[in-house]
Image (cartoon, coloured by chain):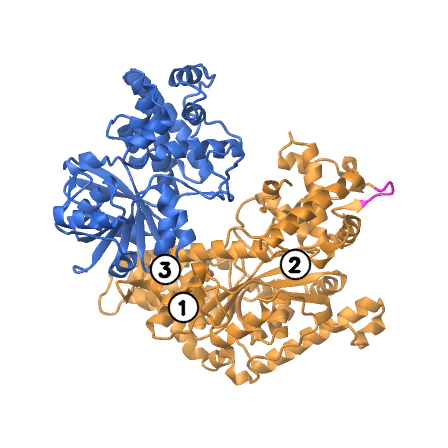
Chain colours: A blue, B orange
């Protein structure tokens, strides 16, 4: 297997970090859509501010990647994921393994409708996780995902960290572990693929809220309150979307939630923080180089919860804040007044 | 592919000569085949119980359970030497305890004697001559019964005006199935509501000109002489649901796996047992289903490109004779049955004949939907058996077993494939379910009544006295109209099928539905009273028939 490559699709910061982790154990092809970037990466050995391992080669030919790599790590924004899979699909076979690292949801809307349209209703048939998009669009069945507290900058600085590889296939988990494990990077396995995907997706909502609290200048009590209540909300939403409770209390759930709800390295946290300082969401998004998945996730999950008739107070409040219908302060006041006072009612 | 009613078409046998039938070839070499099964399961168990001590424990466990079975649940089909055999096993186990021997391997010998025994028990004794006879009896006999019932007179027995072909509509991918049966091995997976399904399916297979399929029949059915005769001649092998031990289950799987490798078309009722609730199966038993994936891998490894196809089949009819006991069982237990308890309706040959008569004569509508053939990974296949993936591209099914260009044994992977396959089969069941007027009225009737008592849980609701439950005919008609519209939309999307009767006006649909819904039960699920309103005589039966249309999310369409 020594001569074989492993593919990473998407050269954003997380994609680049994953490529670096993989490169410790194997040769890596790093795919980017942007042809100009290839030259840059291959000659300067730098990408999005990170130095590249010598085992990494940049490339922008999907057919070539599919031919040379049996194992692929797609790590691109959820909004582009389905199109990427459509482009990739002609070259993929059932022997391919795909372990994605995208923490967002895919929405298929009727023609002419957008996420911001008020009439749009979501149910489980038009809201999909990335593993479901892979199944929809290709013949790939050996599917897994990566999730956990993996802030790109810290991993890049060689700080110790851990992640979860989830798949219903033992062989996919083993492959992920074999490829990613290093002295500073621990890899756990989990069989609940959908559950683990959802933890990664839903925690972004709470990270946004946490950023907002931080932006208002509040401290650790407030954050702890949000994290624990946020976890409860995540669990309710996650169960409704088809995940199991267990996924949420592990590394990819609580672990990732704690990390992203406290770190300015987190994009979603940053968005929340800037919202609290009175910035407009459009300006914030425009000024960021990479996508904060949480913003779309809030919109999708709010409508989803509405459709199925259950309450998700944190998500609903964030939705109003993002829409400009509520200020961050008012949102917080509203949440503090909610007559919900049962601590744990999901077990 | 085509979806038309073909009552009239006569299908020529695709393999006219018996000697070409895979099942005949298999039967000719039965002793050798049984030995192969025994060896195969022996090796599998050895690899699961890979230490001498573990194997001895397994043998001990098996012996103990078998002793209990022999004492507590003896059946007339059991071999006479059952007791002696297990006594001997005990003796051998005792005399070898404490001295595992590397050279003579006494545990291996005991294991082999058990797999030998099981393989012989399971094996079928297919004889073309008795098959021919049994076939003639079924077709001829049923046809005569039909005519007698039709004319209402005994003399009808001697007329041959109505044939089964008139009575039973076969729709769906018939030609496709016939094509594929020549090119590969077919695994037919029907829904299962009634004990008569195997007879009905047997008839369908023959009417479509397909060679006989092998089929795992409950050993309990062999208790009844009449069934035993038919089963043996139809190529059934025996499945003893009392034996849940590892050694037996592995031997059973080896039998199925190897027979499929030999090219025998097979029939599984993937739901395991008859649907207790009346709903289309949503959870399938994956044990036997998995053997088709094992067989496909073995074929590829042996350089045989012989492909295996799965064909879901849905049987649609207006009443299930066993419904009262099935639903009672469901409501009482709502859990898994531990032992198969034989129901009264089938206990004697006389009762069976009576049932057969009812089944084929009183049903006004029996339809059999043949689903689109798939490969073992849930992909549809074209007429040549090529698997079709997204955007119409061909898929090489070999690739599912490859890693770095080599075939890899990975039981956990194959379990996942089986899980996926069973999910796909359930989807196809729902797509090929044909809505009959009786299903429709049962669904509406139950839903409307249930809506009146939102505060009661299901069980308390079902205990309500029936005589107070009335439905206004006008409201009923409006609901029927609404649901028909929704069902038509779902049919357009390919999610369900409808009976031609559903094109009629609502009042006619209701009339037809009420006339046919569970007509042979003492208490009718739905009737129209003298005031013209609709009432029920049995809520639990209504619930049973209503369940048939569960799981379609009519609400999402505004239902």
Residue range (magenta): B528-532
Which x, y percent locates residue A282? 37, 29
Which x, y percent locates residue B557? 61, 42
Asked if residue B541 shows in the view, the reply is no
* Element on which disc 1 rests: helix
Q: Is residue A312 above or below residue B401?
A: above
Q: Chain of mark 1?
A: B
Is there a contact, CB below 8 Å, between mark 2 and mark 3?
Answer: no
Q: Is residue B64 above or below residue A103?
A: below
In the image, farthest residue toward the front: A36
Q: Residues within 10 Å of mark 2 (few under 14, many from 20)?
A: many
User: Mark 1 or mark 2, which is nearer the start of the sequence?
Assistant: 1
The residue shown at (33%, 25%) is A272
Left or right relative to A226: residue A340: right
Which x, y percent locates residue B466? 75, 38
Left or right relative to B270: residue B487: right
As measured in the structure, the alpha-carbon distance from the residue carrying label 1 to the one carrying label 3 is 29 Å
Residue under circle 3? A90
Q: Nearer the viewer, residue B338 or B391?
A: B391
- The disc placed on residue B316 is 2
Q: Chain of mark 3?
A: A
Residue under circle 1? B295
Image quadrant occupied by the C terminus of chain A: top left
As measured in the structure, the alpha-carbon distance from the residue carrying label 2 to the one carrying label 1 is 31 Å
Q: Is residue A194 above or below residue B289?
A: above
Asked if residue B469 shows in the view, the reply is yes
């Amino acid at each position: 297997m020594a001569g074989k490559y492993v593919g990473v699709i998407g050269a954003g910061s997380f994609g680049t970090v994953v490529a670096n982790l993989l490169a410790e154990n194997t040769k890596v092809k790093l795919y980017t859509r942007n042809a100009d970037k290839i030259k840059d990466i291959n000659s300067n050995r730098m990408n999005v501010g990170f130095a590249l391992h010598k085992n990494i080669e940049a490339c922008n030919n999907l057919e070539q990647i599919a031919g040379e790599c049996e194992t692929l790590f797609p790590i691109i924004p959820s909004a582009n994921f389905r199109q990427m899979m459509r482009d990739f699909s002609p070259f993929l076979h059932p022997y391919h393994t795909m372990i994605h690292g995208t923490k967002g949801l895919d929405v298929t809307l009727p023609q002419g409708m957008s996420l911001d349209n008020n009439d749009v209703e979501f149910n489980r048939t038009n809201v999909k996780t990335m593993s479901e998009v892979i199944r929809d669009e290709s013949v790939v069945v050996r599917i897994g995902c990566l999730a956990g507290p993996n802030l790109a900058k810290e991993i890049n600085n060689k700080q110790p960290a851990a992640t979860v590889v989830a798949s219903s296939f033992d062989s996919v988990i083993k492959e992920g572990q074999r490829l990613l494990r290093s002295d500073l990077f621990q890899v756990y396995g989990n069989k609940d693929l959908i559950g683990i995907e959802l933890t990664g997706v839903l925690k972004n909502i709470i990270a946004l809220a946490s950023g907002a609290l931080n932006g208002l200048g509040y401290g650790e009590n407030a954050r702890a309150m949000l994290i624990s209540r946020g976890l409860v909300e995540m669990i309710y939403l996650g169960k409704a979307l088809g995940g199991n409770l267990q996924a949420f209390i592990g590394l990819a759930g609580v672990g990732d939630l704690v990390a992203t709800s406290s770190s300015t390295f987190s994009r979603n946290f940053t968005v929340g923080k800037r919202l609290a300082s009175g910035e407009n969401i459009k300006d914030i998004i425009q000024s960021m180089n990479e996508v904060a998945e949480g913003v779309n996730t809030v919109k999708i999950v709010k409508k989803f919860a509405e459709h199925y008739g259950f309450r998700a107070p944190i998500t609903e409040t964030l939705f109003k804040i993002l829409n400009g219908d509520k200020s961050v302060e008012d949102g917080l006041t509203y949440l503090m007044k909610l007559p919900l006072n049962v601590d744990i009612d999901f077990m | 592919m085509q979806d038309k009613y073909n009552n009239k078409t006569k299908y020529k046998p695709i393999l006219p000569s018996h000697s070409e039938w895979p099942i005949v070839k298999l039967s000719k070499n039965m002793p050798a085949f049984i030995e192969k099964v025994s060896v195969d399961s022996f090796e599998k168990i050895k690899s699961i119980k890979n230490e001498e001590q573990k194997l001895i424990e397994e043998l001990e466990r098996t012996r103990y359970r078998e002793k209990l079975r022999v004492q507590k649940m003896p059946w007339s089909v059991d071999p006479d030497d059952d007791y002696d055999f297990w006594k001997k096993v005990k003796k051998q186990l005792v005399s070898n305890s404490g001295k595992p021997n590397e050279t003579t391997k006494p545990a291996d010998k005991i294991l082999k004697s058990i797999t030998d025994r099981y393989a012989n028990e399971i094996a079928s004794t297919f004889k073309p001559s008795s098959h021919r006879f049994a076939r003639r009896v079924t077709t001829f006999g049923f046809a005569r019964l039909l005519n007698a019932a039709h004319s209402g007179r005994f003399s009808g027995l001697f007329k041959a005006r109505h044939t089964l072909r008139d009575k039973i509509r076969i729709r769906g991918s018939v030609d496709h199935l016939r094509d594929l049966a020549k090119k590969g091995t077919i695994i037919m997976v029907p829904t299962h509501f009634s004990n008569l399904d195997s007879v009905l399916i047997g008839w369908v297979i023959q009417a479509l000109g397909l060679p006989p399929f092998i089929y795992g029949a409950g050993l309990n059915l062999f208790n009844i002489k009449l069934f035993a005769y038919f089963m043996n001649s139809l190529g059934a092998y025996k499945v003893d649901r009392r034996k849940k031990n590892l050694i037996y289950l592995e031997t059973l799987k080896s039998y199925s796996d190897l027979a499929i490798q030999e090219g025998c078309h097979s029939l599984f009722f993937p739901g395991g047992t008859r649907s207790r609730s009346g709903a289309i199966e949503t959870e399938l038993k994956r044990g036997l289903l998995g053997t088709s994936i094992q067989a496909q891998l073995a074929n590829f490894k042996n350089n045989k490109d012989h492909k295996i196809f799965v064909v879901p089949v849905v049987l649609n009819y207006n009443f299930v004779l066993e419904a009262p006991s099935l639903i009672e069982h469901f409501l009482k237990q709502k859990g898994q049955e531990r032992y198969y308890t034989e129901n009264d309706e089938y206990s004697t040959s006389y009762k069976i004949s009576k049932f057969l008569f009812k089944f084929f004569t009183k049903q006004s509508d029996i339809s059999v939907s043949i689903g689109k053939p798939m490969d073992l990974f849930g992909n549809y296949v074209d007429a040549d058996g090529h698997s079709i993936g997204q955007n119409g591209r061909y898929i090489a099914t070999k690739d599912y077993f490859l890693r770095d260009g080599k075939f890899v044994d990975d039981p956990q992977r194959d379990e996942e494939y089986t899980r996926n396959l069973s999910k796909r089969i359930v989807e196809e069941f729902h797509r090929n379910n044909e809505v009959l007027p009786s299903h429709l009225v049962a669904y509406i009737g139950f839903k409307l009544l249930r809506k009146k008592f939102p505060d009661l849980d299901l069980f308390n609701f079902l205990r309500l006295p029936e005589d107070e439950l009335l439905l206004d005919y006008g409201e009923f008609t409006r609901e029927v109209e609404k649901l028909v519209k929704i069902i038509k939309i779902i049919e357009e999307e390919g999610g369900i099928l409808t009976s031609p009767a559903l094109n009629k006006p609502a009042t006619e649909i209701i009339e037809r539905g009420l006339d046919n819904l569970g007509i042979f039960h003492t208490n009718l699920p739905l009737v129209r009273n003298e005031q013209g309103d609709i009432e029920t005589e049995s809520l639990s039966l209504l619930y049973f028939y209503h369940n048939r249309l569960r799981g379609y999310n009519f609400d999402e369409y505004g239902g």
